[in-house]
Image (spheres, rainbow, N blue to C red):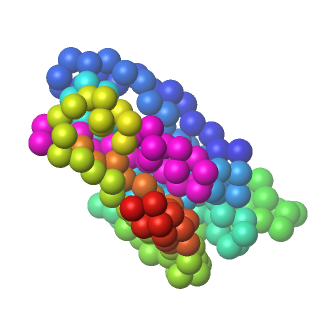
Amino acid sequence: MSRSTNYKFTCPCGEKFSSPIYDYVNVAKDPSLQYTVLAGLLNVSTCPACGRRIAHSQPFIYSDPAHNLLAFVHPRSDVPEEARLLILDKLQTTYDSAYEATETPPLQVIFGLDQLNELINAVLSQDERMGRLALNTFSRDEAERGQLLHIARKLAREMQCQVEVEDLPDEYTVWLFGARRQIGAIMRELAARG
């Protein structure tokens, strides 16, 4: 099971809200989180009032047992060399003592989310790689926007995809992120109804 903690944020607009911040992601138990990571949305919180995004630079463990992948991920790629060496030494010591006699995959240490995305994409088949679909309206009617979001969430739940909203004054976009095969199935379903 993945592990997160609810953090409280205060947006520059004044809105106070809480959002989950992950320190352990297990895609065997929470497969949709893989696409949250690939979309660059893990540990990114969106203000419910103004839509501003707040990125929380929290290191985390990424585990994908099906692809024999275990990684410590530091989200920033600009960590100084001295700090990298300290992190690597501490992690190696902890990993060696904790997983000495188990069949755990080797721990990889990654600095930067781009490097994690490359590693994930290297082990995924073409059908498993991330696909995305945008559903949008130019209507300013809150009821229409709410209906679009409701439909998108229903599709996402059925197809095990993630939903992200981009709420602009003149355009309302609901993004669906998931495996290419799931996104393709949603597109075929929508085309058949259209």
In-image side of 136 versus 41 (left or right): left
- The residue positioned 24% from the left and 47% from the top of the image is 137
Query: In this picture, which residue range is highlighted in magenta?
Result: 149-170
Q: Position of residue 27 (x, y in %)?
A: 64, 57
184 in relation to 94, above or below: below
- The residue positioned 30% from the left and 35% from the top of the image is 144
Q: Is residue 88 visible?
A: no
Q: Position of residue 149 (x, y in %)?
A: 39, 40
162 in relation to 11, above or below: below
Q: Is residue 11 magenta?
A: no
Frontmost residue, 106 versus 49: 49
Q: Is residue 50 visible?
A: yes
Give the quarter of the figure containing the N terminus: top right
Give the quarter of the figure containing the C terminus: bottom left
Q: Is residue 166 magenta?
A: yes
Tell me the quarter of the picture where residue 45 sits.
Answer: top left
In-image side of 98 versus 77 (left or right): right
In-image side of 30 versus 97 (left or right): left
Frontmost residue, 90 versus 77: 77
